[in-house]
Image (cartoon, coloured by chain):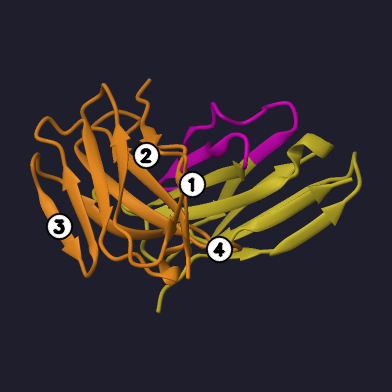
Amino acid sequence: TQLLEQSPQFLSIQEGENLTVYCNSSSVFSSLQWYRQEPGEGPVLLVTVVTGGEVKKLKRLTFQFGDARKDSSLHITAAQTGDTGLYLCAGAPDAGGTSYGKLTFGQGTILTVHP
Amino acid sequence: DARVTQTPRHKVTEMGQEVTMRCQPILGHNTVFWYRQTMMQGLELLAYFRNRAPLDDSGMPKDRFSAEMPDATLATLKIQPSEPRDSAVYFCASGLVEKSEQFFGPGTRLTVL
C-alpha cells in the first residue's frame, strides 16, 4: 500500500511570511499533484509534477518533485490571506493494473494566513 | 467551463433511511471516483470506475453502500440503511486515466441524525 505523509498538519502564519509544506513517501510515484481545497468546496488541482527533480512555479507557489520521485514540497512566498485552505498532495502509481488512474492522497495541511 | 456536478449539495436524514447521491462527471472523462471526507480520516476513496466498470470498491462498507454508473453521464452512491457514522462530505471526481489528474465536484454534505 502506498502512503503519503504530509507535514505539518496545521500551519498558522501571518500575512507576508514564507512557508513550506512537505509530502513524503517510501514509494515511487509516476507523478505527484497538489490540490487546494477551500471550505465548502471540492479540492482544486494546482499542479502536476512528473519528472524527478522537477520544479514548477505558479506565481508565489513553488512545487518541487524529489529526484527519486518519492517526495515533494510546496513553498509559498509572502503568503496572503487568500492562500488559506487545505493543501493536499496526491501521488499517481505507475501505469498498468487496476490502480492505474487512482491517486493516493496525503492527510492534508490546513493553512491559515492571518492579516 | 466543464465541471463535475453533484446533487444534492446538502442532505439531512434520519438513521435507517436510504440516501442516494448523484454525480455527473465531465463529458469525455473515463474515470469516476467517490470519496468521503471527514476531519478524522481525511479523504478516503470509496469507489473507482474506469470506462463505467467498477475497478475498486474496497474502501466501501459493502453491507450498506453501493456505487453504480448506469450510463456515462451519471454515477450514483447509495447508502441503505444510513447510520450517524456516515455523516461526512462525499465527493465525486472524474478524470482521464492516462493523466491521473482528478476534477472534483462541490460535494454532498450528509448528516445522519
Q: Is residue B64 above or below residue A82?
A: above
Circle number at residue A102: 2
**Secondary structure found at label 3:** strand
Q: Which residue shows up at 31% across the image and 37% down it?
A: A23
Q: Colour of chain B?
A: yellow
Q: Secondary structure at mark 4?
A: loop
Q: Residues within 10 Å of mark 4 (few under 14, many from 20)?
A: some
Figure quadrant of residue B12: bottom right
Q: Quadrant of residue A95?
A: top left
List the residue tagged with mark 4.
Answer: A41
**Looking at the image, is mark 2 or mark 3 nearer the viewer?**
3
Q: Position of residue B111 (x, y in %)?
A: 80, 50
The span from disc 4 to disc 1 (Cα, nearest Å) is 16 Å
Q: Position of residue B34 (x, y in %)?
A: 54, 46
Q: CA distance from mark 1 to mark 3?
A: 27 Å
As shown in the figure, which amino acid type bears the numbered disc 3? Lys
Q: Residues within 10 Å of mark 3 (few under 14, many from 20)?
A: some
Give whichever of B60, A18 is nearer the camera.
A18
Which hue belongs to chain A? orange
Q: Which residue is mark 1?
A: B33
